Amino acid sequence: MRSSLRTLTTISLSALAGLVAICSRSAICHAETAEEFKPIKEAEMPAGFPTYTSVGQIEIKNYPAYRKATASGSSEFWTLFRHIKENRVQMTAPVEMDYGDATAAKSKERSMSFLYENSDQGTAGKKGAVEVNDVPAMTVVSIGCRGSQTSAAIAVAREKLLKFLEDKKDEYAVAGPLRVMGYNSPFVPRDKNFFEVQIPVKTVKAE
């Protein structure tokens, strides 16, 4: 009986060790996948835009001035799509979504914008349900994200950005609303979807 128990214990420990090894390999594989992940390019970025922020990484990025068309409401995407077709504006990536106060406990999308390929393309102003605006050059703190663009995923990314800014409060301060930069259409599988969550920032002047 004791011999049988010892045998079972040995087998159980071996099985447990094997399970741990499998889990460890799985975690390493997942980490490598995150590092090696390359966003699927469906459209060109506007002129002068910085490249993607790697998944899970936080960095400071500088954007040039650009022109964008903005709409809001349940049909905002199709409103913008009709706008660029009617005005012969090339579809670019990313699509920009404004989520309001970056420091608010809860936030939701307030508007969507399609970005013009060049800042001198077309003219600024109100065009039906679309507002075309010129955005000045800006600096943001950005985190790369992979997967479904859910409110929960955005909230987690936002908290990481705020923690980053808290750690660097002597260098940077929030200077604008939370925004999500989406690079992929619904045709891309959700696990391949890539987006960035960003907060505009300004440098803190030393006293």
Image (cartoon, helix red, strand yellow):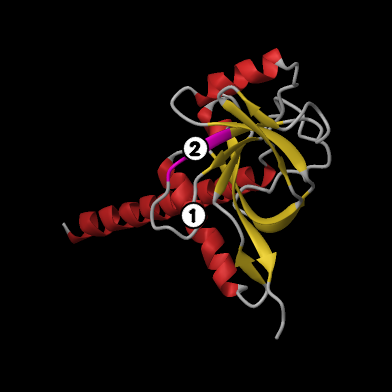
Amino acid type, mark 2: Gln
**Which amino acid type corresponds to the residue marked 1 in the rendered image?**
Asp
In the foreground, 131 or 62: 131
Single out the residue that lies furthest toward the left: 1
Q: Is residue 109 magenta?
A: yes
Q: Which residue is mark 2?
A: 149
| Region in magenta | 108-112
Marks 1 and 2, how far apart at CA: 19 Å
Q: Residue at x 69, y 34 (%)?
A: 68
Magenta region, main secondary structure: loop
Extreme top residue here? Answer: 86
- Confirm whether residue 60 shows in the render: yes
Q: Residue at x 48, y 22 (%)?
A: 75
Q: Residue 106 location, x and y as percent?
A: 39, 52
User: Residue at the spot x=76%, y=40% of the render?
Assistant: 66
Of circles 1 and 2, which is in front? 1
Numbered badge on residue 101: 1
Considering the numbered disc 2 on the image, is that residue within a helix, a strand or a loop? loop
Figure check: 152 above or below 119:
below
Please give the count of numbered marks on the rendered protein: 2
